[in-house]
Amino acid sequence: MKNGGHLRSIVRRALPVCLLTLVLTLFSPVVHAEEESLGVDKNTLKQQLADMAVEKIFGELHKVPEEKLKDVTYFNELVRDMAPLGIKLDETNFSDTALSIYNKYKEAREKGKTPEEAKQNVKDLLKGDVKSLIFQSLDEGSQEVLTDLQGLYDNAQSDLKAILDLNKELEEDPKADYAELLKKYGIKGEMLEKFEKLEGQIRGIADSDYLKAGQIIYGGMSGSSGDKIEALFELGSEFGGKIPVLGRFVELYFKVAKEMINATGRLGKLLNERQAGCLGEGTVGFIGTVSSVQNERNVAFSKAFGGTVCPVERTKDFYRDVYVDIEDPNRIYFWTGDGFEKGNSESGGVGSLKALRAFLRTVGAADKASDMQFIIRAFNLKPGFLARQKEYKEIIEEIESLIKKLNSDLSCVETNEFNNLLKEKGGLQGVIDSSDGLVESNPTSRSIWLGIDQVVEKMLKDRYIEEKGALVQDCRTALKNLRDIVPVRIRGEVFIEM
């Protein structure tokens, strides 16, 4: 976004604020927040930081070995974690103070004070001087903290406005080119996964521990670690959240974060409608996002497969759960409710799927036509429903054609003898036996009636529903046998000697 560069210049190692732009979750409707500021001046922050530094120096002075009090660097160690905030005990400037601490302690001991009493005496005498010294060094550091915090908040507000403006454009113009608008507003979806974790972490924390929630939000938004704001959070945790500017920052930042989540939730829904329910590359929601409105299917598909797929028919119950690859119509995917299963690319694609379901309804198996697991198994049988249907029909048609040809070629053969030839040598007795009465011979007719459509239907039912194949095998055997029957005509003359 337009302010992304500014944010990166403010927070060392911070990620772009556009991390915020596509978090998907549901909140109640909100109105864009009024422009606000942290409202804490530099002197207030300086006083708080100086008090905390003094507490770090003197808080456990009674536990410090005497030899440590002679070491200037020891005091630096006590406030090392406050260095990013501008508190640095320069050894040259602080050496006199460190020496005073030791001398006051030694004087008290010489007067008969116990070690604990001596150190308390030092604290009472020098606390004010130490705080004054630290306070004077905080001008630059404290101003940077305030500037950074205000900058983060202002940039988040700016990004929120961009999302709200984009939502407005999409809602007012249903035909707007959403891809161009995303480009215009600088919105990207590939950074969302981190925010899924962020939303999950802060859920249930905000009301009970604002400091922890703020720390999590800041870490998730900026990706920062070890800088002055992180140090400020750590200090706030140590001292029970008593830093006014920190509380104000968390309050405002958390507020704008929730508004951003709401706005981007609306955006995700709008974009999902614009992409016609398609999943995968080039679509919205194909990375894990906030669980309440993330596109579960898109996440699941993108993790398991590549490319882009669209539902076969968005308005029909079954077909909205079947997706076809936009580049290859033979590649289809089935949504099972908890994941995707890939269809066999050699099974004929959507055309074969629709023909299979139509067949199941025709033969009284409508329940199986709506059973996703059954359909997946049936569809994946090679070479696919349409190819198998065509094969079976061609088998029966050729059998009938061969019977007619034999009838013509063997017209001189008696009817009963001809029919026995078909059943025994031609293998049609097996077809009659496995056809459940669909195929029969008529003693008075030179033929065996097949009924192409009925027999093909029976063959398909056996394969896809009954899971048996006797009729199919018998028909293939009969076809082979009939092809092998070759009538031979012998012409000649008979001479009778008288």
Image (tube, grey):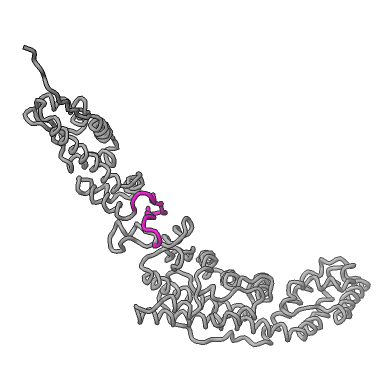
Q: Is residue 59 visible?
A: yes
| Residue pictured at 37% horizontal, 53% vertical | 336
- Name the image quarter holding the C terminus: top left
Q: Residue 274 occupies which quadrant of the picture?
A: bottom left
How far across and down, in percent of the image, does residue 328 sit? 39, 58
Question: Closer to the camera, 238 or 448?
Answer: 448
Q: What residue occupies the far top of the structure in this picture?
A: 498
Name the spot of residue 240 as percent of width and height, x first. 64, 72
Q: Using the rendered view, name the quadrant where residue 418 is placed.
A: top left
**Percent position (x, y) of residue 4?**
57, 79
Q: Compared to 378, does 192 lie above or below? A: below
Instruction: Give the residue at x 51% y 87%.
Output: 35
Give the residue drawn at x 68%, y 76%. Answer: 228
**In the picture provided, is 464 more to the left or to the right than 439?**
right
Query: Horizontal and vertical percent for residue 385?
Result: 29, 47
Taking 83 as reference, is 167 left or right?
left
Region of the chain picked out in magenta, as a range: 326-348
Q: Main secondary structure of the magenta part?
A: loop
**Total residue callouts:** 0
Verify whether residue 342 appears in magenta: yes
Pick whichever, 196 or 72, lies toward us.
196
Judged left or right of residue 234, residue 346 is left
Q: Residue furthest front?
A: 498
Q: Is residue 286 magenta?
A: no
From the viewer's perspective, is residue 166 above or below residue 435? below
Along the line of sight, the residue nearer the viewer: 192 or 279? 279
